[in-house]
Amino acid sequence: MSTSLTPELMPDPKLPVTAEPEVVPARGTSPGRAKLLAFLRHRGTWIGGSLLVVFLLMAALAPLLAPYDPLAVNADVGLTAPSWAHPMGTDDFGRDILSRVVYGSRLSLVVGFSCVAISAVVGTLIGLLAGYFRGPTDSVLMRVMDVLLAFPGLVLALALAAVMGRGMLSVIVAVGVAGVPTFARVTRGAVLGVVNTDYVLAARAVGCRSTWILRRHILPNVVAPVIVMTTLYLAYAVLYAASISFLGVGVQPPTAEWGAMTNAGRGVLVQGWWVSTFPSVMIMLFVLAVNVMGDSLRDALDSKLRRS
Amino acid sequence: MGAYVVRRLVAVIPIMLGVALIAFLLLHLAPGDPISLLVSNFDQGAPPDLVNQLRERYGLNDPLWLQYVHYVWDAVRGDLGTSIFTGRPVTQMILDAAPYTAALAGASIVIAVVLGVTLGVVAAVRRGTWWDNASIGVSLFGLSIPQFWFGMMAVLIFAVNLHWFPSSGSGSFSHLVLPALVLGISASAAIARLTRSAMLEVLGEQYIVTARAKGLREVTIISGHALKNAFIPVLTLIGLQFGRLLGGTVIMETIFNRQGLGTLMLTSITRSDFPLLQGTLMVVAAVYVLLNIAVDVSYAWFDPRVRL
């Protein structure tokens, strides 16, 4: 067994990812369509989805929703408890927490989605190449992935962010890179499951180019696990990015970022619980929404991938 | 089995060489020169020959590859360099800090496994009941709650308000309780979810029906037959949770002002103490890799079908 460091939802490389014999679909319903329907019928899709829509709207309409300027310092109302004027209270600089939380959704969404985009694109590409070409390409790429996986995710991201200098961009790259090996492994596993199927061999036999085979015959088979991984890692990425900012290495104050805001509330935890609580609750709700969506995606797309 | 362990340990060598390379390159390609920090307390800038002398002493004038070879060779002999900030040997600083992190991570993983497996089994056995829903709900929240905020709330409630445990420090057992509980509970969420789904799968197997038909007691069936088989995927996840735990110790050590590797890593980042950061990265990666090998080896113990 060499399953070390494999994510719990990595499909068994020995099995084709969609090994279950599909029930012959009725006329007009493709397997993909059936999966989409299953996804749409899932309760989690609606709960998680509507929460995510709320977050997207919040980010898009931040200037309209935020009652105050998120950066405006007001010494008169320093550290006041939640009230009608400030529904989430104010921090020790008198900044309105609600406004900062609302603006913070922009950063968290941008950071979260950018991280995952980096991990998914780079990781999937590496996994495709490694699984399809095998041989030295495979060895070299996967050894590099093994080395990256030798670091705990947060530790790697933290170190990367630290050397790249503080700020949003380095957090994005750091958390993005930290996620690459997981995607590469999952994708490679899925590729190995189909690379020796008859249709791939036939495509090779008739002289199709590798890029064509990869795009037309292999990629569709790895889409399902990659989508599931994407939602799963989105949840991790948001938590990692917030943790890095919380530890003071990521997005710096006074920028309204949920992790950095929580950290800022640490000094006044006893006098003002609300300063750190509301940004953290937002992180939790966002991650919860993503997790719930991820669960229903997993249920709909791939019964082989276990819940964790 | 012995041969397998040896083979896995040999495979650690290239991985650690890669880890060293990453740790080494990260910090040498990073902006900022450790020497300029070292001499930053000179008001009118440091004398150039002093800078040069220091560069010579730390071997920074050598070509990069030679510096890497020196670094690895020293590391093999247990010398991870000298902290730029404190002037103490990095190895010694790490050895001083490591027991605290080991205690925290060890206590957390025990809590995580006991709590997670119990919750998962209860949920699976009482499928569809209030117990099941509560356990699913709790673990979903556990997955989504940011560890840093969870830790801060624990401090606020159990240290500041109830005075049950100290809020900071790392000396005694009572200092360990809160951070270990926070980390353990947060890691138990994923374990509970996977245990539940693995148990549900196993409980539908024929041999469970047979065991029931034989008239075995339900407790024996659950613990002896079902859990033993369901535990194998859970074991993989536990290996992964080590990574989350090691990352989590950084956060907990920060919140609870505990000594440990995480604190060491963070201070090395804030002080740009490159040798210390390199050293902690190396040690954390080595520990993580070895823990994962231990998990792989333990498969054979839980599952006689696994031949190593």
Image (tube, grey):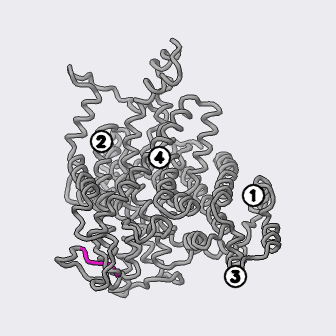
Q: Which residues are magenta?
A: A88-92
User: Can residue B217 be spotted in the picture?
Assistant: yes
Residue B113: x and y, percent? Answer: 43, 61
Which residue is the site of mark 2?
A299
Which residue is the site of mark 4?
A118
Residue found 50% across the figure and 18% down from its top: A201
Task: Report, in whole angstroms, how far the alpha carbon at label 4 lies from the one at label 2.
Answer: 25 Å
On screen, residue A116 above or below B138: above
Mark 2 or 3: in front is: 3
Residue at the front extreme, as displayed: B44
Count up the numbered dots: 4
**Nearer to us in this view, A19 or A54:** A54
Residue B81: x and y, percent? Answer: 74, 68
- Classify residue A273 as left or right of residue A168: left
Which residue is the site of mark 1?
B72
Mark 4 or 3: in front is: 3
